[in-house]
Image (cartoon, helix red, strand yellow):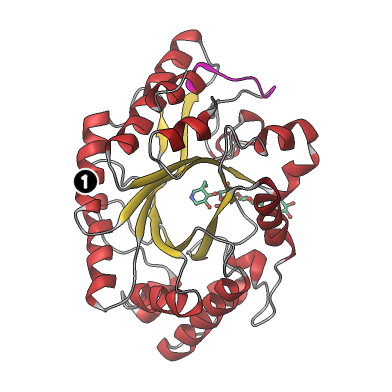
Amino acid sequence: AGLNTAAVAKGLLYFGSATDNPELTDSAYLTQLSNRDDFGQITPGNSQKWDATEPTQNTFSFTKGDVIADLASTNGQKLRCHNLVWHSQLPSWVSSGTWTNATLIAAMKNHITNVVTHYKGKCYAWDVVNEALNEDGSYRSSIFYTTIGEAYLPIAFAAAAAADPSVKLYYNDYNIESPGSKSTGAQKIVKLVQSYGAKIDGVGLQAHFIVGSTPSKSAQTTNLAAFTALGVEVAYTELDIRMTLPSTAALLAQQSTDYQDTVAACVANAKCVGVTIWDYTDKYSWVPSTFSGQGAACPWDDNLVKKPAYTGILNALGGS
Ligand code: G3I
């Protein structure tokens, strides 16, 4: 069995991968992405972000996002929708606009209402707010935080819930995968949104890890339990585990262990619904362009050949 088949047999809802529009012209890539034995879920890596969906104010563009949504539908895969409110990949009319509390709330609500309504019934979940925190757990000074204050979070969740009452609403961030200040900050966000009476269903743990310094399975298990104790589900949403190049047999073996530990932590928590890797092949990973000299972060190599990490994931899922 493949990764998704094994995941579902273990009680998860899906095992999935991110993808992006330019890669879909690569037919070998597309064939493997569409293989539901391995991937029961996909996430658009860029094409539902604010710069793509509302490049000028109140003019919406869903063409690229629809390509990924239609692909998921054709393949019988769930779609994780990503994302609505984030400090990065904002069009300049948002990031460099002149805003008051009231005008930015109105623009944010209009964005959320239009995008969520367009994709209504097509998404398993929305990442409503992405990466709101600094490493110490305090709020990042985004245009949203500096203009609106922390209330922008519950306002965003409430607007998403109003537009689609059925879709799962997530807070999504990185470096919240083991106990510490930032994870505690994310738990505070869950409580904040709940305290406003707004709906929050889940926390997405991105899990952009480094080979050899991936949090242990027990640290991750403890951490997931702290979230699910608040009444929300959890998912690993952007898992990849990078290394300093060149890759060696020893690094690939450690990477396999690190993938296995992470997926096993999800399996161990009844409210961890799934794992998404941030693209499945090193050929299209975001890592080398962001971290010079690093890469080989995915379970499939540049030639779309499975690496030891694939077996590590399968082991965690009890498959063979
Ligand atoms: O669209 C332009 C294109 O017109 C231009 O020719 C090209 C030249 O550089 O750039 C294109 O934009 C790039 C965009 O991806 C689309 O390919 C940006 O430069 C590039 O920075 C952007 O990177 C994305 C990154 O988010 C931006 O922060 C990655 O593909 C995407 O995988 C990554 O995903 C994020 C998640 O959304 C949130 N968590 C972290 C994760 C990894 O950074």
The answer to whether 131 is drawn above or below residue 245 in the figure is below
The answer to whether 45 is drawn above or below residue 240 in the figure is below
Q: Nearer the viewer, residue 317 or 18?
A: 317
Q: Can the viewer see residue 224? A: yes
Q: Quadrant of residue 169?
A: bottom left
Left or right side of 7 for 301: right
In the image, what residue occupies the spot 66% across and 24% down?
302
Q: Secondary structure at mark 1?
A: helix
Q: Residues within 10 Å of mark 1 (few under 14, many from 20)?
A: some
Q: What amino acid type is highlighted by mark number 1?
A: Ala
Left or right side of 234 for 98: right
Residue 28: where, in percent of width, then height?
76, 30
Task: Give the extent of the magenta segment.
Answer: 303-309
The answer to whether 105 is drawn above or below residue 217 in the figure is below
In reply to whether residue 126 is colored magenta, the answer given is: no
In the image, what residue occupies the spot 61% across and 29% down?
282
Residue 126: where, in percent of width, then height?
48, 62
The answer to whether 168 is drawn above or below residue 238 in the figure is below
In the image, what residue occupies the spot 54% across and 26% down?
299
Q: Can the viewer see residue 96? A: no
Outermost residue, top side: 249
Left or right side of 27 for 82: left
The residue under label 1 is 225
- Count of marks overlaid on the render: 1
Residue 76: where, in percent of width, then height?
63, 48
Q: Nearer the viewer, residue 89 or 65?
A: 65
Main SS of the magenta segment? Answer: loop
Quarter of the image that includes the N terminus: top right
